Amino acid sequence: RGGGPALASSAFVQLAYPWPITPDSGDLPEALEPPEGLLAGLIAAGALARGTFRSVAGSLLPVVTGTEPVASWGLAPDNPWARLAERVCLIARQPDGWALQSDVTTSPDEAWRAGGVSRMLASLVRAARGTGEDEFFGAKGPALWTRVRRHLESLLTAYWREGGLGGHSLAGAFDVRCHRST
């Protein structure tokens, strides 16, 4: 089993960098906190307050007083820090304080790279799996297909109403098909 970038690439993995310095990090090795805990807290708070599909990029981090190393932000797109922010959730200084500069997954597929998109699709998959598990041993046929379709339509409608899906109408936002051919 080889190593390499493919093993770290996933639409369901988010990494953060660099290591933050906080008032509570003084008794930790090198007086630095692992950044993933801070990221997980931001994602959880954002999901509760605004929905799982909304990006947490730009969120101010009032507990952060510094990082190691310090990211150079605001430079040209070919800057190594800007390129890193395409695959890693980067913590950097802004004029009004320390903030999360990017909310991304490690996915090599750009369509799956946005953190909010990945989290929304993960929640949809989890909901669909839950519906399937509830119906697994029931009678198969049109009644089941209707129940599953309605459940998924209800879930997708809620996402659409909250702004998680595009489209000027429900018909333009999604289409759920659940019948003999699926």
Image (cartoon, grey):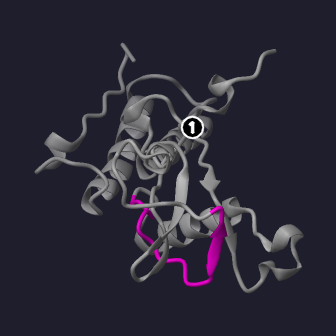
At 51% across and 34% down in the image, what residue appears?
A: 107
Q: Quadrant of the N terminus?
A: top right
Residue 81 picture location, percent across and down: 49, 50
Is 61 part of what is drawn in magenta?
Answer: yes
Q: Quadrant of residue 139?
A: top right
Residue 157 picture location, percent across and down: 29, 53
Q: Nearer the viewer, residue 54 or 148?
A: 54
Left or right for 8, reference 147? right
The kind of secondary structure element at disc 1 is helix
Left or right for 166, reference 55? left
Q: Quadrant of the C terminus?
A: top left
From what the image shows, is residue 16 above or below residue 43? above
Q: Nearer the viewer, residue 147 or 35?
A: 35
Q: Which residue is mark 1?
A: 129
From what the image shows, is residue 110 above or below residue 83? above
- Region of the chain picked out in magenta, as a range: 54-69
Residue 155 picture location, percent across and down: 38, 51
At 74% across and 62% down in the image, what residue appears?
A: 34
From what the image shows, is residue 159 above or below residue 179? below
Is 182 part of what is drawn in magenta?
Answer: no
At 62% across and 49% down in the image, what residue appears?
A: 15
Q: Nearer the viewer, residue 180 or 50?
A: 50
Name which residue type carries label 1.
Arg
Q: Main secondary structure of the magenta part?
A: loop
